[in-house]
Image (cartoon, helix red, strand yellow):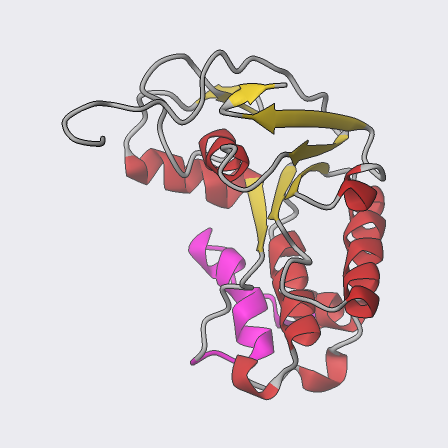
Amino acid sequence: MLGGTSIPVLQDINFEIEEGATVSIVGPSGSGKTTLLGLCAGLDQPSSGTIHLNGIQLTGLNEDKLATIRNEHVGFVFQNFQLLPTLTALENVLVPLELRGIKVQEQTAKALLERVGLGHRSGHYPSQLSGGEQQRVSIARAFANKPKILFADEPTGNLDAETSQSIEDMIFELNRESGTTLVIVTHDLDLAAKTQQIIPIKGGRIA
């Protein structure tokens, strides 16, 4: 809303993603790609149209129902990691399991930290970890509840080139192993080229 006038962020967006596919949403800053990811993941609601996630219509659901669906079906990796600063690496990975009411499975969480090369840092807090290490913890957390769909919003945006390559390889490798559908928002065309499908966004529309 600007000066009493509603300005649409996205218009005439229509696409489907096949189960198990790898997809990138690309576009310049301000194009609406992060907003699109938020809509697809049930973090936001559209003013019109419908969204289906893993066969479930999200449109019109209240926040409690949306949160339940996200906890059961979705994993997230964000540019700024979004780890809880007062929890250790291990405790951060356990969060999705605890939100689903699953009995605490420390062995599962420890195995995931080992998988991302941080088994020896499980007792460390985010402030004690490098940016790359924090992103590895967030990847382990994202896969903890065995999501059907993983949404990654600029997952390497705050990392140097060498660390970015390592994180990219890890996301794709874990994705292949788990059969998860992968949706990446990125401005990095080299990263986008690694996915099976590219959805270019420009000015709030599919270009």
Question: What is the x, y in percent for residue 176?
Answer: 84, 43
Question: What is the x, y in percent for residue 61?
Answer: 32, 26
**Residue at x 53%, y 70% (from the top left corner):** 92
Is 185 above or below relative to 106? above
Left or right of 83? Residue 46 is left
Does residue 97 belong to the magenta stretch? yes
Residue 104 visible in the shown view: no
**Which quadrant does the C terminus fall into?**
top right
Residues rendered magenta in the picture: 86-107
Does residue 98 belong to the magenta stretch? yes
Left or right of 145? Residue 19 is right
**Which quadrant does the N terminus fall into?**
top left
Q: Residue furthest front?
A: 3
Count the marks: 0
**Residue at x 31%, y 19% (from the top left corner):** 47
**Residue at x 63%, y 37% (from the top left corner):** 149
Q: Quadrant of residue 133?
A: bottom right
Question: What is the x, y in percent for residue 77?
Answer: 60, 53
Residue 26 visible in the shown view: yes
**Residue at x 49%, y 11% (from the top left corner):** 12
Is 68 above or below relative to 137? above
Is 61 above or below relative to 141? above
Left or right of 164? Residue 42 is left
Q: Residue furthest left?
A: 4
Q: Nearer the viewer, residue 123 or 103?
A: 123
Q: Nearer the viewer, residue 13 or 93?
A: 13
Question: What is the x, y in percent for residue 192?
Answer: 77, 39
Left or right of 75? Residue 95 is left
